[in-house]
Amino acid sequence: MTRIVVDAMGSDNYPTPDVEGAVMAAREYGVEITLVGDESKIKPILDSAGGATLPIQIVHAPEMLTMHDKGDDLVMKARHKDAKNSMAVGYDLVKNGEADVFVTAGNTGAAMVTALFRLGRIRGVDRPALAPPFPTANGYCIILDIGANPDCKAENLLQFGIMGSVFAERVRGVKNPRVGLISNGEEAGKGSELVKAAYPLLAGAKLNFIGNVEGKEIFNGSTDVAVTDGFTGNVLLKSTEAVAKLITEKIRETIKNGNLATKFGGMLVRPALGVIRKMLDPSEEGAAPLLGVNGLVFIAHGRSDALAIKSAVRVAKGAVEAKVLDALKSAIEESLKK
Amino acid sequence: MTRIVVDAMGSDNYPTPDVEGAVMAAREYGVEITLVGDESKIKPILDSAGGATLPIQIVHAPEMLTMHDKGDDLVMKARHKDAKNSMAVGYDLVKNGEADVFVTAGNTGAAMVTALFRLGRIRGVDRPALAPPFPTANGYCIILDIGANPDCKAENLLQFGIMGSVFAERVRGVKNPRVGLISNGEEAGKGSELVKAAYPLLAGAKLNFIGNVEGKEIFNGSTDVAVTDGFTGNVLLKSTEAVAKLITEKIRETIKNGNLATKFGGMLVRPALGVIRKMLDPSEEGAAPLLGVNGLVFIAHGRSDALAIKSAVRVAKGAVEAKVLDALKSAIEESLKK
C-alpha cells in the first residue's frame, strides 16, 4: 500500500482542509496516510471526518514553518537535526524509508529549502525545479522551473528538460513527450544568452526536443513540457493567473451591470464560465512536483481546500506507483555519461 | 498641424488597412498625413477611401522590409544611405524635421533596427524599449521592455523606468505614475540578480517607485508602469495573450456544445464577452511607443485593421502634442547628473 505523508499544517486554513482531504483520499484511493503536525489540533478533525477506521496515523510535530520563516532563520529550522516542524518531520519519514512521498500545501520556499536539507539532491542535478501542470486547449503542459531558481545556467535548463520529460511520460502518461524551450521567438537562434546556450544542450539530449516555444505553443497544446528559468517561469505563472482572474471579474461585472437579458444569459452560461474557474482553482491538479530532490515531494497551493489536498494525494500516489524517482535518477545518470 | 508619417506597407494586409486607417484619422483628428510606400498601390485605395480632399500626401518608397529581413541583410537595408524601403524613407522624414512622428504596423524587429540606424538614440539611453499598454482592471499598465532587449543590465531597467514614467504622465495623463519592477515576489530582495541590482537604482531615481510587482499588481491596476527585461516582458506578453485566447475559445466551445439554455444564454451575454476581445484586439490601443530613439515612433500590431491604424495615429498625435520626446530627453539628462 502506498504510504503518503501529508503536512497537516500546510494550507492557509490548516489543519482542516489538510486533514479532511487526507481522509477523503485514504477512503477513495486506498492509501496509507501519515499526518504530520500538532496532534492536539489534528485529532478532533480526523475523528469528526471519520478517519478513525481508515489507515491514517498521526506523527506529532509541534512546530510549523510559515511565510515568515526566511533567510538564515529558515535555513536553521530546515537543517537542524532535531527540528520539530511538520515539514522536517515529514521529509525525514520519506528519507528514512517510512513513507513514499511527502505532500504539503505549506510555504513553497520553506518546502523547497527543507527538502534540500533533509532529502538532498539526485546525483547530477544541480537545482531542483518546481514543475506544475498548466491547463491547455487539450490537456496540460508541465512548465519548469516556476520559482525555485531565479538565476539559471544552461545546464540547469537541460536537467529541467530531462526531468520534465520523465515526469510527463511516467505520471501523466504522455508518450515521447514534446519538450519546448520558452523563448521570445520560435525560430532557433532567438532568445536570451541563456536560451541560446541551452538550446544545443537540449537538442543534443535524448529528448523529443521541439525547439523554442512561446505562449501560443504552450497554451494551444503544442508542447507537453516547457523549460525555462525560475524567474521567467514564475512571472509567467503569476501573470497568466492574474489575467484569467481579470477576465472572470470583468465578465462577471459586465453581466451584473448589464440589462435584464444579459443578466438572464449570465445565469444560463454560468456553467460554461466554469472553465475559467478551473484555470484558477488549485483543486483540479492541485500539486506540483519538486523534481530533482532525492525523494518524492508534491507542493500544493496554499489556497488548497480538502478537494485540492485529495487531488494532490492522488497525483502523489501515481508518482510513487510509476516509480518516478528511479526513472528520474536513471535519466539524469544517462545524460551524465555522454 | 501635427504631421504624421504612416507606413503604408506595414500591416499584414497592407496597404489597405494602413491607407484607410490614415484617411479615417486625417478626417477625424485633423492631422496632416504622409503615406510612405509604393505609390501605385497606395493611390487607388487613397482615392476610393476619399482621401483626395484631405491633407494626405504620398512619398514613394518602392521597397519594403518584411518578416524575412533579418541579420546582416536587415542591417544593410536599415542603414544604407539610399535605402528605399518604406521604413527608412519614413524615418528620414522624421529625422529631417519634415514630420513629427512615424507610425508603422510592420515587422517589429525591422522597425526597431531601422529606427536605431536612421534616428539614433537619445543621449544617455543605452537601449530603446518597446512599451505597450496592457489592459488592467481599471485602465492600462505600460510594460517595458517587451522584446527589444532580451538581455539587460540594471542600468537599462532604470532607463526603462524613467522613460515609462514620462510616457505614462505625458501621454496617458497619469499623475505621478507608479513604477513597479517585475519580480518573482513582492518583497524587496526577491528576484533574479538583475532585479536585485536594478532595485536600488530605481529606488534612488526621481520616480514614484513602488518596489517589486507581480502579475497581480500589474493586472489589478496597482501600478502604472512595470519594468522588466525584454525577454521576460515578451514571454509575459505572449503568454497572457495566449491565455486570454484559450479562455475565449473554451467558453465559446462550452456554449456551443451546451444545452439549449446555455446556447441561448451565450447569445445574450455575447456583448459581455467583448471584454476579452478587447484584450486580444489591437484596434483599441493599437500602438506601442519605441522609447529611447531620437524621434517619435509607434509600432502597431501586424494584425492591425484600419481602426487600429486610426487608433495608432491618435496616440501618435497625443505624443507629439505632449512633447514627449523633449520630456524624455530632459528626464534622462537629469538622471545622468546624479
Image: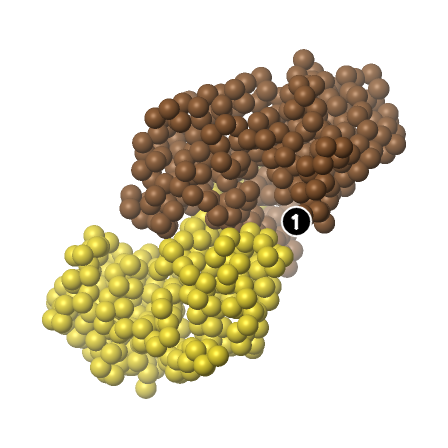
Chain colours: A brown, B yellow
Furthest-bottom residue in this view: B1
The residue to which callout 1 is attached is A71
Q: Type of residue at label 1?
A: Gly
As displayed, is residue B298 above or below residue B93?
A: above
Compare residues A327 and A46 and report the one nearer the observer: A327
Compare residues A114 and B167 and report the one nearer the observer: A114
Estimate the x, y position of residue A61 in percent, counting from the top left. Answer: 80, 32
Residue B24 in sight? no
Q: Secondary structure at mark 1?
A: helix
Q: Is residue A18 left or right of residue B99?
A: right
Q: Is residue A97 left or right of residue B70?
A: right
Compare residues A215 and A166 and report the one nearer the observer: A166
As displayed, is residue A326 above or below residue A262?
A: above
The part of the image, by quadrant, that contains residue B284 is bottom left
In the rendered view of the protein, which quadrant contains the N terminus of chain B?
bottom left
Q: Is residue B213 left or right of residue B41?
A: right
Residue at 44%, 66% (x, y): give it: B155
Residue A270 in sight? yes
Estimate the x, y position of residue A101 in percent, counting from the top left. Answer: 64, 24
Compare residues B32 and B195 and report the one nearer the observer: B195
Estimate the x, y position of residue A176 in percent, counting from the top left. Answer: 39, 24
Q: Chain of mark 1?
A: A
